[in-house]
Amino acid sequence: MSTGHAAFEPPLSDRSTWQAHDRCSIGRAMQVVGSRSAMLLMREAFYGTRRFDDFADRVGITEAAAAKRLRELVDAGLLERTPYREPGQRTRHEYQLTPMGRDLLPAALALMQWGDGYLADDEGPPIVLRHADCGAPVAVEIRCAEGHDVPMHELRAGRPRRG
Amino acid sequence: MSTGHAAFEPPLSDRSTWQAHDRCSIGRAMQVVGSRSAMLLMREAFYGTRRFDDFADRVGITEAAAAKRLRELVDAGLLERTPYREPGQRTRHEYQLTPMGRDLLPAALALMQWGDGYLADDEGPPIVLRHADCGAPVAVEIRCAEGHDVPMHELRAGRPRRG
């Protein structure tokens, strides 16, 4: 088996001892946002969409699908459903990002960056994200707590250190 | 509408003019890796898994599901299927990451980081990633090309500049 091609080498000598599929955080994350419509609703929330009709319309899914997914995102803790009322109208609800929802941004941007690089059509990516302060384009990067950029081959997977 | 709660403010005055759902790179990315099993197969590829049996076993899906998803990931360009042969055995195939597959790593790590933060059980995350050179834990961060860390409220979405 050509382990020399591994993206990174886990220091655990026998992978069979740490089969992570039942507790894996990627698996748990994908159970919450592992559908195209859920991730696109989160994209819309990041762009500032709040109202139900806007979510359904801008993601391009049916109202029934939007209602189901938004309820799941509320139940999972990514969005908060709050009432609002305009003069002369009945009470409606809008959906706002929670801290848990906001913290999904790096994952959404990383997917966008990957899609921009490999899946965009000849016109290129439809949207570019820039840093407001300096105007430079923004990217998602892998860094360690010491501030080093970490290329894939310098990643090591291990068990957490417990006290 | 409470746009003051937007994660970031697009500089495009009217969101209705840039409905991106048909060309959105997040949407395109999710069409390729927007299922739990696809992302977990990619996780396994990052950890060094190469053989069909190992993929099915370690992700905890049926062989039929693994075969279908692996074929999709090969067709989409994330994995390459190559033959190998051990002495006395028939020819088998293994799956190796392509550059496109390797470049999905920030998205997979960002999902892991988010799952670690919000979805782990009382024991905490099962796996920690560290920088081989210095041992410090690794994180996915949003930075601009000038090297600034970019908090969510300093992100601006706009159309690409064309020559």
Image (cartoon, coloured by chain):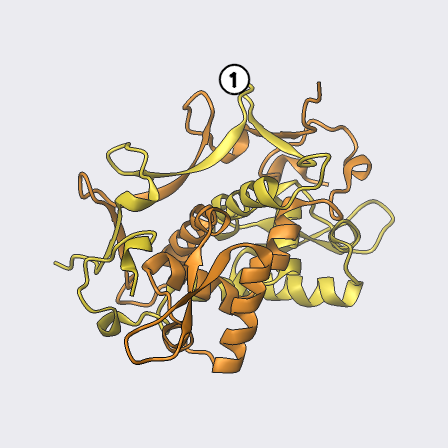
Chain colours: A orange, B yellow
Q: Position of residue B159 (x, y in %)?
A: 21, 60
- Give the image quarter of residue A112: bottom left
Taking the view exactly as shown, the residue that stands out farthest to the right is: B88
Q: Secondary structure at mark 1?
A: loop
Q: Nearer the viewer, residue B163 or B18?
A: B18
Q: Nearer the viewer, residue B53 or B138?
A: B138
- State the residue at coordinates (17%, 65%): B13
- State the residue at coordinates (65%, 51%): A28
Q: Quadrant of the C terminus of chain A?
A: top right
Residue holding disc 1: B134
Q: Is residue A69 left or right of residue A58?
A: right
Q: Is residue B159 left or right of residue A102?
A: left
Q: Position of residue A20 (x, y in %)?
A: 74, 43
Q: Is residue A87 left or right of residue B44?
A: left
- Using the image, determine if residue A68 lies above or below residue B83: below
- State the residue at coordinates (51%, 35%): A152
| Residue B23 visible from this viewpoint | yes
- Using the image, determine if residue B102 lies above or below residue A155: below
| Residue A34 visible from this viewpoint | no
Q: Position of residue B145 (x, y in %)?
A: 26, 38
**Disc 1 residue type?**
Cys
> Around disc 1, counting alpha carbons within 10 Å, would you say few (fewer than 14), some (14 to 19), or many (20 or more)?
few
Taking the view exactly as shown, the residue that stands out farthest to the front is: A88
Q: Quadrant of the N terminus of chain A?
A: top right
- State the residue at coordinates (29%, 45%): B153
Q: Chain under label 1?
A: B
- Using the image, determine if residue B18 lies above or below residue B50: below
- Give the image quarter of residue B130: top right
Q: Position of residue B92 (x, y in %)?
A: 76, 55
